Image (cartoon, rainbow, N blue to C red):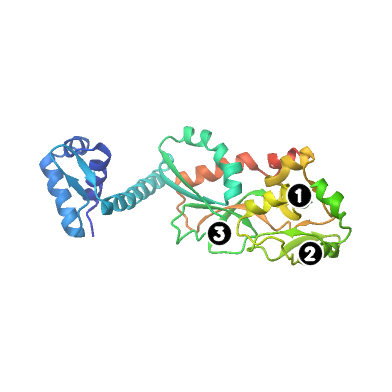
Amino acid sequence: MADLLDLKIFARVVESGSLSAAGRELQLSPTVVSKRLTRLEEQLGARLIQRTTRQLTLTEVGEGYHEHVLRVLTALEEADAFISGSGDPRGLLRVSAPTGFGRLHIAPRLKPFLRAYPEVRLELDLSDDYVDLIAGGFDVVVRIGSLEDSSMVARKLAPNRRLLVATPDYLAERGEPVTLADLDRHQVLTTMSQPEWHLDGPDGAIVYRPASLLLTNSSEVVREGIVSGLGIGLRSTWDISEELRAGKLKRVLPNHAGSSRVAIWAIYPSRRLVPPKVRAFIDHLAEIYGPEPYWDQVLG
């Protein structure tokens, strides 16, 4: 197992770009820095840094190892900060979120967070696939759905209101459905990952199985199909509130809506030690969205 000081030396050499600069920061001679770096490479059985008289260059293995070392050192700093109770958010923060939601409601609101915490580096991965928090190595996963996995800690960021919608032109051409059964005679659109619509209706919870006109794994493709007048779909208000407000989309079957059990969650590993960077990011999103998110307020 690598020595902690060797890991610190390796990280400082990479960040400073020279053995002597790393030595000055760590109060070690360049000779000691060089020997410890060589010892680390020998223990690992891999060259981490290509050293010449003019420059230091990370090898491909060294690049990957450096990312892992930074996570280890950051985790240790956060553990120390947790004990002292005075830790500031810092280090690499890995976040996963659905593509559309991340693009519309996370990316545009990162500036104040990153300015408030300049020592945080954010890695934002957007995907419509189900993301495994642990296997993916993420600190936080923003997930839209009903809460099922009790092995994780989840904080509700906002409700997720979902409505059946279509364009006025589509409805003028095909007619408006009056009952849920009428949808069988309409063009409906959904992703392959949503073979069932869980709805709340006048008589309680209902499961409707749409026969989608379009087969796709992309929620954004479905959205564009609905907005272009291709058919009826079940969409979250965070995704189509502007189109509803502008009259480009119209609500269909207003007595039915997506299940209220579905919400927008921040999920993170179940543990007592929550890094300051994770807590700060979740607090940031929760404060922006809240129980009455801004995308619903524009609907009145």
Determine the secondary structure under disc 3.
loop
Q: Mark 2: which amino acid?
A: Ala
Residue drawn where x is 85% and y is 62% of the image: 182
Frontmost of labels 2 and 3 is 3
- Dividing the picture into quadrants, the one containing residue 300 is top right
The label number, if any, that marks residue 229 in the structure image: 1
| Residue 62 seen in this snapshot | yes
Q: Residue 111: where, in percent of width, then height?
A: 52, 34
Q: Residue 167: where, in percent of width, then height?
A: 79, 47
If you read the primary sequence from the N terminus, does the residue marked by circle 1 or circle 3 appear first?
3
Frontmost of labels 1 and 3 is 1
CA gap, disc 1 and disc 2: 28 Å
The label number, if any, that marks residue 129 in the structure image: 3
Q: Is residue 67 above or below residue 21?
A: below
Q: Nearer the viewer, residue 242 or 134?
A: 242
Where is mark 2, residue-wise? 205
Q: Is residue 272 above or below residue 300?
A: below
